[in-house]
Structure formats: structure tokens, C-alpha cells
Image (cartoon, rainbow, N blue to C red):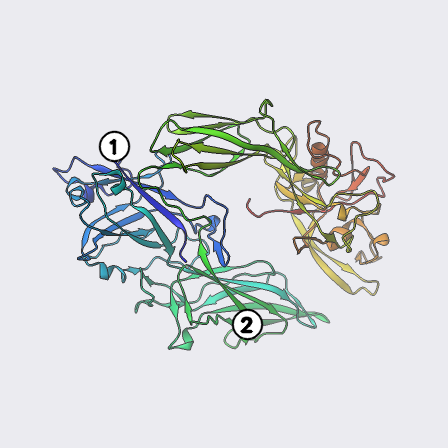
Amino acid sequence: MKTRFAFSYLLVLAFLMIWQGCNQEELVRKGQENIETLSLQIRIGENNVVRAGTEPGDDALNENKVSSLQLAVYDNATHQLVWDVNCTSLFNAEQSRYMIPVPQDVQSKFDGSKTFNIHLLVNIEPASIPESENDLKHLLVEKSIETNILNDFVMYGSTAKNIDMSTLEGKVLGEVQVKRLASKLRVNLTSIGVDGYDLVDGSLEAKAHNIVTKAYLDAEEVPNTAEYKDSEYRPLAVGRKPHYYSYFSSWDNDNSLKPEVKIHARFKKQNNPSEEVDSYYTIPIDASDKKLKSNCIYEINTKIEVLGGSAEEEPVSIHGELSVKEWEKNEDEFGLPATEYLLVAEHNVTMSKIETYEVSYVTSKIPITAVIQDPHYSFVDKNGVEHHDPIPSENEMYPEVSFDGSKIKIESKLPKNNVPKKFEVHVLNGVPGLMEKIVVIQFPAEYILFTWGEKSSWRPDGTLAPNLNNKAIYHIVSLIPSGDMILGFPPVETKGFYRPSNTLQFRDHHITLSDEATKKMISPSFELASQLGATIRMEYKKTYSNGNLKYDNTPQDSYALHVCASYTETRGGKVLDDWRLPTDAEIQLVDKLQNTPQGAVQSIMTGRYYWNASGTTTKIRNGTGNAATHQAHVRCVRDVKENM
């Protein structure tokens, strides 16, 4: 299966009005002023559908980005080049399409009497297109893929069409599926533990070996001029997956060309921490067909349980479980009807702190209509009950839709209840079977999301303590700081916890700093432990006479710093272990949100006092119970940096 970037083309009967991004010298010569335009509509990833055995490209890594297009049209019978055009501009949002001029002398060739083979070259440096279609397959691609984040990826696809400029049906070229020429390598370290040794913080790193640097456009061969290289080392950790890219590779006839992942770590002896050793490992990519294929993701899952080799040239080979996925765009198949169409430029709209949003559209028939569907708020109330509350049409919060030229105008007042507003806009043009759906989510400046906890280190059996009933893990997002609060992820430090014998039990790397500046900080995105992590009253800190923090695994003798350092909560089968004490400002924000008169979520933190990271307590406005400034409750938080 190839990447489902569906490129749909419309040739519009209009004189050329827009030239941006196209090489005018190539397209227009004297005597060719009468030009019609080919309108290129690109549909990428509007539906949240991922097929089994596939994985979507990562927008943050530019894996779905289209920067430029080159179109090559060949005669299906002679396989000789008829026309090629290079466009370098980005998608024209105003027009909701690319505008590609078709010179008059080329138009005459598209009279409906022939079938043409159409090739799309995406994100390739302007190439000299060969006259013979057979030679196109071996067009050399040399774009570098050696860095962690690329500007874009070379992609390629083709289709066939009987083009007829005299009919609308003949101008709709349909769908072209393109695929990336690169493959993606990724290493997933599931665990690390070597008897008698501790990992030196920050020492773990990995690199890819035998990355191929060049490719052919559409041939599973390694070019003679390609090199096999090593990537640079990249940081590695349990749960952190460094990635690397390579063009097509084959080692069927030479096993020394097999790609590998190489890992380096430093360990220190537990009984002599000053003695450190280097440890090198190698994990072969044992693909069954002995190939790295384009547009595939190869992920190695492994764990480290023994010391590696002491030199990079003599690594220890460790087992890796290889999984292979097709690397596709996150969308369904898409094709235009032959004569009727309706397209919107965006299918997923996020309105953050704004009340008006416009979406461009094109249609073969007017007028169009739009209908609001399922406006609602989703949240979990103080009793742990999940809500899907509809918004009545007469309510001031009900969204409205109107049309302004070639744009759909969506208007919706910002929610006042601290949770997102969700709704759909269904767009129709009266053609049976044609309907475009726009999914809208609207966020106020501060809002609360939720997921569900299953069990925790505080409540390992998954039951709630008496008088508690809410397993929701609230996710609190702040887009704008208020007052003198500082918006940013609070800095953390590492502290150790010791047994009475002065033996280090464990280190935690998520201890929130206790200084005055951090006290005012609010994470822009953090989760609050569910009531599975609600604690009894306790002290802030317990130390030995030498100042070392005490380790104690009995809840009744625990203390605030220890609770969050050792706290875990399980969600969807995954153990979350990166919790920390909240800052004073973060607790105040939660208290503000839970006391908003119109707030959908209330009674989140119900005790009278809670410990904050500075070692002082924060008083809750309407808190109850017998907590005090020296004996307070604890509610841990964790930063959420994904999708930020």
C-alpha cells in the first residue's frame, strides 16, 4: 500500500490570472498568451483513520509536507514526453488549490483521443525530465535525508488519464497516490537494567549504520553512486524513540551492507559509583526480504540487560524485535466525481481563543448550504460521571455559519465553562452523495480535558478510598498566563531517596525546583493525578541527620516529596511515572477553575491545604477537612509536552 496522499486535479476554463510558483519562462512563450489553467487540488489527512499495519507521517517532522510539484505527462502509446511543468509555490489557501497554466499549444494535444501517463514528482529539486518514460524510473534522487528533521521528503506517484480539454469530465484527472522514497528507522528501548550497575544519566545514545544516501525515482535498486553512511548519535531513553531515514537498501548479496542500530551507554558500578565503563551494542535490522523499502517504517524493539563491548569497534550484538509498518498519510481514499465536486480546504479546524474562522471551498454547483451538527461539551463532573452535554440552538453558545464569497465563515462564542466546545459543520451543494464535513473544536484561554486512570501506586488495586468517586485524570491547559504568573514548564532537578543504612534506593528526575521564580510558574499543559492519587495528610519532607531524603514504602509514613517522586498511575495499560509536585501557581489555577461559577468541572481538589513544590502549602478556597499548614494533602502533576 502506498501513502494515501490523494492529489485531485481540476482544469478550470479561465484565462491565466495567477502565475506564482511556476516557471513562466518554461510555460509561456510569445504567441501563447491564450492559456487555460490546470487547478491542482491537494487532499492530505483530513480524516482520523489509520489502517492496521500502517502509521501516519508526523507533521512536526515535515513528513507530510508538500513544498513543490513537478508534473510530467507521457504519451501512453509511445512513452515519449508530451509536457512537463515545475511549480514551486506552496498551496494557495485563497484559491484552495494550485493553479498550473496549460499553454495553448499543449491544450491542443489533450483532445480526448489519447491516454496519457501522468507522473507527479513532489519535493524534488527541479529535475530535467527525460524524453523517454522508461528512463524516468531511474531518475537519480540525491536530496539529503541525514538530519533528524528534514525540510520535506521526496515523493512520487503516477496515474493514467484520457485528457479532453473540451469537457469537464476530461479535465478531472482523478486520484494519484504518492509515496515517500525514504524509509524510516526507529529504535524503541523498552527497558534497561544491568545487574550491579546504574546507567550514567544522559549517556544513552543511538545511531543508525549503513544509511543509503541516494535513490532512483521508481526502481528498487541502489544507485552505484550511493554511499552507505552512519548517522550521528542521538539521545535514547526508555519510551523515547530516536529515528533515522534511509533510501532503498538491499543486502541480499552482501551482508556487510545490512543496516544496524548502534547503541552507546555508560554505566557506573553500584558499589563504586566513581568507576564508569563504556558499553557498546549493535542491533541488526533483520528484515525477512533483506531490504529497506521506501515508504515503510522499521521499528526495532529491544532491551539492555548486559554490559556491552568496551569499544565501538567491538560491540555486543543484542536481540531486537523488528516490526514493519507502511508509512502512510492519515486519511481515507479520495476521488472526485467525474463532473460534480464539492471541496473544503480544511476538515479539522481548531479555534483557540478565537470566535471567528474561515474555511475556503470550491464547488461545481451553487448555492451551498451548511448545517451545524452535534454541538456539545464533553467533560467529567465532580462525581466521576462523563458528560456529553448538547448545546441548545437557542443558547448564546450555539455556533453559526454563513458564507462570504468563496469562504465558509464559522462564528462561535468562546466557552465560559472551562471545557472545549465541539461541533461539526456539514456542507452540501445539492448534488446527491456530496457532503463535506468540518470538525471544529474551540478552546478558551484555559480549559480542562480528561482521560481515565485505572490504578496507582497509592491505590494499586484500582479502588478509590472511601468518599472518593472520580478516576478522571484532568488535563489542564493554559494558553495565557494571568496576573504575575509565569507560563512555562517548571524546571525540575534530580534527588535521591535513601534507606536507613544510607543506601540509595532510587533517584527521581522530576523534582520541581523550590525557588521563588518556579513557585509562580504554570505548566502550559499538565495533568493532575486522579483521586487514585489523593492522599492523607502528611509532612512535606523527611530527612536523616545527614540531610539525605528518607525512603519509605509505607503510605502512612510517607511525605509529599516522596509521594510524587515514587507515584505512578496507569492509563490505558501504560504506567505514567513522571509525576512531580505542583507549583503554588498551578494549585491556584486548579482552584480558580473549580470555583468558576459556570465551570463544568468542580470539586477537583477538595482538601483544605495542599503541599506545593516550594515546601509551603496552598489553601483551597472552599476546601474541607482537617489538613493544616504543617500537615497537608498531596496531588501530583505531570507535564504533557506531546502535541504542544
Q: Residue at x 61, y 29 (%)?
A: 391
Location of residue 520 (image quadrant): top right
Give me the disc on residue 281.
2
Which quarter of the rendering shows the C terminus?
top right
Farthest-out residue, right: 626
The image quarter containing residue 171 is top left
- Answer with left or right where residue 388 lies relative to residue 501: left
Eye-nearest disc, 2 or 1: 1
Q: Residue at x 40, y 56 (%)?
A: 2
Left or right: residue 30 versus residue 507 is left
Q: Which residue is mark 1?
A: 17
Position of residue 262 measured from the top left corner of the image (x, y, whole percent): 51, 69
Where does residue 496 sit, x and y in percent of width and height? 74, 58
Q: Secondary structure at mark 2?
A: strand
Q: Nearer the viewer, residue 136 or 177?
A: 177
> On the picture, is 417 further left or further right than 249?
right
Is 537 or 416 nearer to us in this picture?
Answer: 416
User: Does 62 sit left or right of 573 as displayed?
Assistant: left
Q: Position of residue 556 (x, y in %)?
A: 86, 52
Task: Name the mark on residue 491.
Answer: none
**How many marks do you count on the picture?**
2
Under mark 2, the amino acid is Tyr
Query: How far is mark 2 from mark 1, CA to CA?
Result: 60 Å
Question: Residue 395: x percent and y percent?
Answer: 60, 23
Residue at 54% across, 75% down? 317
Could you tell me the amino acid type at mark 1? Answer: Met
Q: Quadrant of the N terminus?
A: bottom left
Label 1 secondary element:
loop
